Amino acid sequence: MSGDWISVRLADKRLVAEDVAALLLEPADGTALPPFAAGAHVDVELPGGLVRQYSLCNAPGDPGRYELGVLLDRQGRGGSLAVHEQLAVGQTIRIGRPRNLFPLVPAEHSVLLAGGIGITPILAMAEQLAADGAGFELHYFVRSPERAAFVDRLAAPRFGDRCRLHVGDRIPPSFDAPALFDAPRAGHHLYVCGPNAFMDAVLDGARAGGWPDDRLHSERFAAAALPAGDDRPFEIEVEGSGAIVAVAPGQSAAEALAAAGIRIPLSCEQGICGTCLTTVVGGVPDHRDSYLSDAERAANDCFTPCCSRAATPRLVIQL
């Protein structure tokens, strides 16, 4: 979790689509908010001690406000429900400084694909690219018109005809997938954000069409489904402290460490945000996160204790 909390006031809260609330945050003390780049998110401290991450969706460069879009997930872990039912206009809350795990890179042309609430970081990217006069196209996929958020902004003249709405299941016929996926052009980069099934379909289609991985960029809001792993018990040794902590089946390494009085910063608790990333100096982790790259996993010198486990009887970590 971010260590530098910022107090902000909820200046406005409104529904912008079915089950999607837009939050307008302004600095509580009137000072400028930290700058951010398109693709960034902030940690938000919610009632009940919950901390969740939400993408910034307003145009970068406005120091006076942040805008978030939050989808209500009634089957979720309580964060979105707290946003929709407990946050009220005028209330002061705390947020972390912006962090960016999904940045834009210089490109001749950017292809932006958003599914559902994945429009939030993608919209900020479109704003930045439009302001820069850069080449881009945006495809927004929703199951029904009522679920399309921020359509008023997408229809703004600054975007011209570069934003297209596709309504239907996952990737409907209105989207010409072969035309995009089967002819990757040099200098083109593709960005995708949304539900895991949608993202998997997009990334699989792009790779099958010949898009190289270094031109595919993605961010997940929920941990990707992984094959069932072995939840056998293991031990964690904290280097230099003499502490050896047993991790039971069904218990996360972070939970076991906390029970032993060793607390590691947590935020998403799904292996998405990297807040709890911890250095490994001995043993081999069983990586179950959606944060590390394949190369970082292969190095086996760090792991996410909120969800990952051990492939060896003991991991030695450094705090």
Image (cartoon, rainbow, N blue to C red):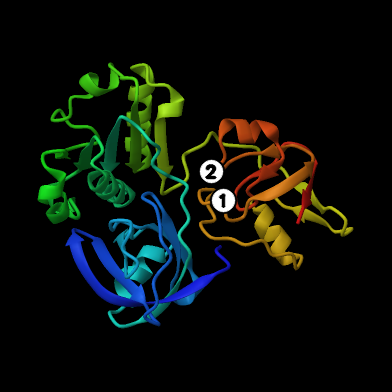
**Residue at 31% over, 73% down:** 85
Q: Is residue 13 above or below residue 253?
A: below
Residue 303 % position (x, y): 66, 45
Asked where in the image residue 185 lies, by quadrant, the reply is top left
- What x and y, as percent, mark residue 102? 43, 44
Classify residue 260 by image quadrant. bottom right
Left or right: 131 in relation to 310: left
Mark 2: secondary structure: loop
Q: Nearer the viewer, residue 302 or 123?
A: 123
| Residue under pointer 2 | 291
The answer to whether residue 270 is left or right of residue 278 is: left
Location of residue 189 in the rendering, given as x and y in whole percent from the top left corner? 35, 30
**Up-down: is 108 above or below 220?**
above
Q: Is residue 31 left or right of residue 272?
A: left
Q: Badge 1 local density, few (<14 within 10 Å), some, or many (20+)?
A: many
Q: Nearer the viewer, residue 81 or 59?
A: 59
Residue contact at pointers 1 and 2, CB within 8 angstroms: yes
Residue 274: image tag:
1
Is residue 249 visible in the rendered structure shown here? Answer: no
Say which quadrant the C terminus sits in.
Answer: bottom right
Q: Which one is nearer the viewer's eye here, 160 or 24?
A: 160
Kind of residue at disc 1: Gly
